[in-house]
Image (cartoon, rainbow, N blue to C red):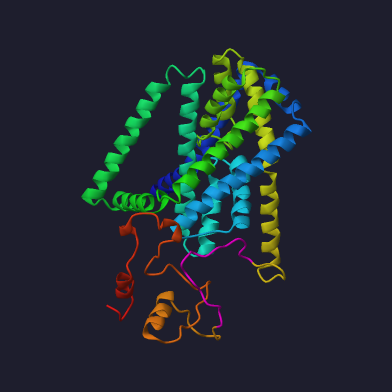
Amino acid sequence: MRSDVVGFGRAVRRFGPLLLRLAGGVTVLWFLVRLLGSAPFEEGLRAVTWPAVVAAVTLTALTTVFSAWRWRVVARALGIGIGWPGAICAYYRSLFLNSVLIGGVIGDVHRAVAHGRRAGDVALGVRAVAWERLWGQVIQAVVTAVVLLTLPSPVRPALPYFLVGVAGIAVCAALVVRGAARRGWSRLARAARATSDDLRCQLLAPRVWPQLMLASVLNVAGHTATFVIAARVAGCTAPLGELVALLMVVQTAVVIPLSIGGWGLREGAAAWAFAAAGLGAATGVTIAMLYAVLMLAAVAPGAGLLLGDAVRRGRGPGHPGESGRPGLALRPGRAFLADRRAPGDRPQHPANGALDLVRGRAARPVSPVSVRQPAVRLRSPATRGGRADCQPRRADLLSALPGCG
């Protein structure tokens, strides 16, 4: 009996959040069908045109490049770089997975783990993707607040109170984390120290944060332009300023991970926003439906890339013409020699090679495959504009090596 209870608890913890998100999206869609019927959804499907698809694919390609740029900046600042082709392809894969799977974040998890495994540090790869996504959402929230405060919208009267509430919650969370760090609570203390180090020494460096802001603003502008195209194709004649404000509200609702690729919450938010603006709930649902179809077509290259990955895995890693590690850029400041170890040699740690150089001996070759996280982490060149205490001194580096204390 006890084993059955334990197994049921494990199943709830494992599948409960996914089922909750699925139920949330399905419930909203069911309510909209009951309230408005299926006509708005059918009109959204019938409104799809080839010029609209081409425009959506083009704008999504640009926003994907901007997102990959933001990811590369964050990853390089944390010391785990990635090349342009690999970043763009990985982002297309994550966009497609986020669009068709429950929760809207599984694609980002896939991107983070794959990048971390290639670079030899999964935890750092996850941190890079988490910071990249968080930075983009924070900038989107700021842009949305500015637009809603400037342009007329149904949420404008209540927006100041909402912003004050969000600011209060953020301040309380910061105080809790700071108190946990001071009192030494293990998990919160480590998270607080890692967050502080990432922000103070890497992400807020003068050469980093302007690029992150610009890439995020361009990304938001691209998605908003795609939404505006969907609204015009669906026949909405509202003024551009009012339309942009309404669409920003819809995009903010899509960020909530309580649906399948945004389905349900997007249509529900569009129905409420357009109804509150006097444009009709059915119009909002039609626009949201058309936008969803256009975005599925725009992220279809990600499906092709995933299919190609599956084909390459079926052929095996030794298939001619395949590198197996596309788009990988090793951490700045680290140099690896070619792998010329004889069969049976044990892999050498990079710190041993550095010690040999200090002692005047020739360093043994080190294989990138066998390299794990080094004992001493070197900061990337992107953080040179940060504070001086974030840069390791040469004496500290030498003292950390065996025999050099």
Q: Quadrant of residue 25?
A: top right
Image side of residue 314 versus residue 164, left or right: right
Q: Is residue 346 visible?
A: yes
Does the magenta segment cover residue 169?
Answer: no
Residue 291, given in percent of the width and then of the height, sits at 66, 31
Does the magenta segment cover residue 330?
Answer: yes
Q: From what the image shows, is residue 80 above or below residue 184?
A: below
Q: From what the image shows, is residue 123 above or below residue 46?
A: below
Residue 166, given in percent of the width and then of the height, sits at 37, 30
Q: Is residue 271 visible?
A: no
Q: Residue at x 54, y 15 (%)?
A: 276
Q: Residue at x 48, y 79 (%)?
A: 347
Q: Quadrant of residue 251?
A: top right
In the current view of this chain or complex, which residue is farthest to the top? Answer: 278
Residue 88, given in percent of the width and then of the height, sits at 62, 51
The magenta region covers 324-340
Residue 201, given in percent of the width and then of the height, sits at 37, 54
Q: From what the image shows, is residue 208 above or below residue 357?
A: above
The secondary structure that dominates the magenta segment is: loop
In the current view of this chain or complex, which residue is farthest to the left? Answer: 183
